[in-house]
Each structure stands twice: as structure tokens, then as C-alpha cells.
Amino acid sequence: MCFAHSGTASDALHVQAEIPTDAAAAFRSIRAQADVPVGLPGQGTPERVLDGYTSVNHNRWNRDLEAAVVVRPGEEIQLLCRDALDIGDQARTMTPDGTMTIDLGHIHPLTGPVFVEGAEPGDILEVEILDVAPIVDFGYVTISPALGIFGTLRPEALAGFAPYTEASQLSDPAPGRVPSALPQDQPYGTGAPYVQLFTFERGQNTGFATFVGKDTGTRARIPISPFLGIMGNAPMRKGMYRTFPPSVSGGNGGNTDVRQMIKGTRLQLPVYAEGAKFSAGDGHMAQGDGEITGTAIETLMAATLRFSVVKNRTIAGPRAIVPAADPTQLAMTAEMRGQGYYITTGTGPDLMENAKTAIRDMIDWLATDEGLSLHEAYALCSVVGDLKISETVDLPNWLVSMTFPRGIFNRTTGETR
């Protein structure tokens, strides 16, 4: 079912994500191989399925987009979501240099919009996450000299990554372009591109993903806690907005990458358009707080959701009730938790520089004590390393820390390397 908006069809269609013919065929092949579940484990069969492998997707926020489906409050729907970089099965064989050809104009394909009956401006949309599970058996982390906490982009490629204002995120109708990269801020040598695969089972939403370091063969078990990095409603104002910021117009939600928003979460979002027009994507199997390379374990995801409307209440931006403050720790075994954690720190008046200091030290420590390459260590820090602002009282000298679970590597209790 399609909900027609008050604008013309062309107003909406020019912001739909373009699907190249070869990519569309690849997605159909992935879905056929994956035998996509209509009902996810423990949740029965959702009443509706919205398939993001067809043309039902977009990668700009726009309140004038036509809705892809209409649901009633209390009705379950499953969203099938493409991976954030929109490379699908190509990730299995992608070379490091291949990551530099990814078109940033096509990333963040979102499944939706979902029109929720009864939702009106001035209401709250509540999204109950009933389940999240991968459609395929692999995920990936990429390292690009352009992106991540140490990345830099040339000024002409900075749109969407610029300091946030609504104006800075307004997009022209044309897709973006591959950025020209400046050398990375990389005193420890992670400036070259890199891609690392992780494996798990289709439909798996508990347990571990397998890491085998591409450079050294080092093995690790990564606790998984699948979630959607992007969830949001139509923006407050008209216009096309890029999907990179955590919210665009009016705190509508977006690329929040809050790893705690797993199965069992109740997310609240402000409503600015009739029907809310909710969309989601950017599935992650595991992520550390910070997502420092710019990617987590990216994968193709199915999410079962249920919507409700809180009438005549407003909020400033996304907020949620989540099942756990640290899903990664919950996913670990007692033996893994017993191995303890590495912690590094950075101190000074600049929070970003402090974060970089803590990350550099962690990468060096992992390379030295765990035998990882610098690329492998950087990738794992993005997946299970957690950045925290640990101290603000001694202004202007803030302290940022990074924690990293030692138990993901194979060792006996108390063993050091």
C-alpha cells in the first residue's frame, strides 16, 4: 500500500536511492541465497514485510517522500535493510583499493518510509524493536583514509561531514561523489585502505561473530548485539537532508549509532509530518561506542518493529528505554569477562584530541601484546572498543578513556602476552 503525499510524484522520486541494475541483481541473489525469514526467532510472524532490496528505499531525509507502506498502531512490520555502504555481496571479495571506489552518494540506503496511522505533528512515535537479525552470514569493517576519527576529506567533499547546521546538510538532488582524500592523520600507520570480514550465522542474534585477522591470522570471538544504526522520522522542515548526522531537522533521529538500541528497546521520536514517515537501515552486528573507523560490523539486516503513538506530547530529539547499558558485556561469557579489560586514556582541553590519544595508545597496545597488525587493531577498536568521557570535573582538562575486552582473544584466565 502506498500513501500519496500532497506534492507531485517527481518531488519525491528524485531522492529515491538509485539502484544500478547489477546491484539490484546482486541483492536479489543475496536474498534468494539467504532464505529471508518472515518471522524472526521468538517473535512469531510479522504481519507486514517491507523489502529494502527492491526500489523501496531512499538515502536522503525528505518529508515529501511518498510512504512505502501504511501500518496501524500495534501492527508488526519487518524491515529488510541493505548494508550501510550498499555493497552487499561484493564485500566478500572487495580489496582494500576497492573500498576507495565506493560512491558515498549511495551509502545509507534506508528502508521506508513507513506511514503510521494517527501520528501527527506534535505527537511522539514510539518504536518497539521486537527483533533484529542478519539476513546474510557475513559483515565487514572498512578503513578509509577519508573517513573515521583519523580521516580527512578535501573541502569539496566535505558536504555531509561538515560541522552540523541544517543548511550544511541540505543536499542537491544528484548523488554524491567519491571523495578525494588527503593523507590520514596516522602516526601509527593506518593511512592505507583496508577491509576486514567477520562471519556468523544467518538469522543469528546472540553469541559471537568470528574474526580472523586478514594480516596476521589472529583469531577472536566478537560478542554480537545486532541493532540498526539509523532510525528516524521525516524531518521538521522541507528539503533533502543527508543521512550522515545523528539528526537533521528538529531532532528527527537518524544516524545515531547507539549500540544499546538492541532488541527490546523502546525508541521515541518526535513527529513532524503526518504519519511520521519512519525509515531505518545501517545494520550493525557489533559496534564499540564511537564507531571510530566510520564502520562497525556492517551487514544486511532484518528488523521486526511495532509502532505506537503518544498523542500531544513533544520531545526535543530521540530518546529510548534500552535493555542494557552494555550489551557487549552481557553477550560475553563469564570466562571472557574474567579476562578483564584494557583501558587507555587521553587528557587535555580538546575532547577529540583526547579520544585520538586514547585510541592510538590502544592500537599500539593491541599490536604489541596481542600480535595484531595496526589495521586489525584499529578495526577491532571500532567493533568492541568503547570511548567514554570519564572525567569533566577538572576543567578545562577533560579525560577520555577507551576500554577493550581482553577476553575476545584465545587465552586462559590470568594469562598475559
Image: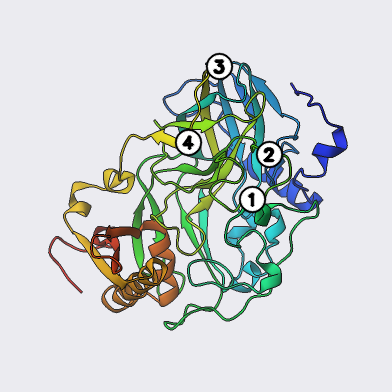
**Which tag, 3 or 2, sits closer to the chain's start?**
3
- Residue denoted by label 4: 132
- SS of the residue under disc 2: loop
Colour scheme employed for the rendering of this structure: rainbow
Of 412 and 57, the residue lying toward us: 57
- Residue denoted by label 3: 73
Q: Nearer the viewer, mark 1 or mark 4?
A: 1
Q: Crowding at label 1, few (<14), some or many (≥20) Cα neighbours within 10 Å?
A: some
Q: Could you give the CA–CA distance between mark 1 and mark 2, rounded to whole angstroms?
A: 9 Å
Residue type pointed to by label 1: Glu
- Residue denoted by label 2: 237
**Which tag, 1 or 2, sits closer to the chain's start?**
1
Q: Could you give the CA–CA distance between mark 4 and mark 3, rounded to whole angstroms?
A: 20 Å
Pointer 1 with pointer 2, Cβ within 8 A: yes
Q: Could you give the CA–CA distance between mark 1 and mark 4, rounded to whole angstroms?
A: 31 Å
Task: Name the outermost residue toward the left.
Answer: 414
Q: Would residue 227 be found to the left or right of residue 393 on screen?
A: right
Residue occupying image coordinates x 39% and y 63%:
380
Count all numbered tags in the image, as a single digit.
4
Q: Could you give the CA–CA distance between mark 4 and mark 2, rounded to whole angstroms?
A: 30 Å
Residue 404 in view (yes/no): yes
Residue type pointed to by label 2: Arg
Image coords of residue 142 (percent x, y): 54, 64
Is 343 located above or below residue 316 in the figure? below
**Which tag, 4 or 3, sits closer to the chain's start?**
3
Residue type pointed to by label 3: Pro
Is 231 located above or below residue 118 in the figure? below
Which numbered marker is on residue 166? 1
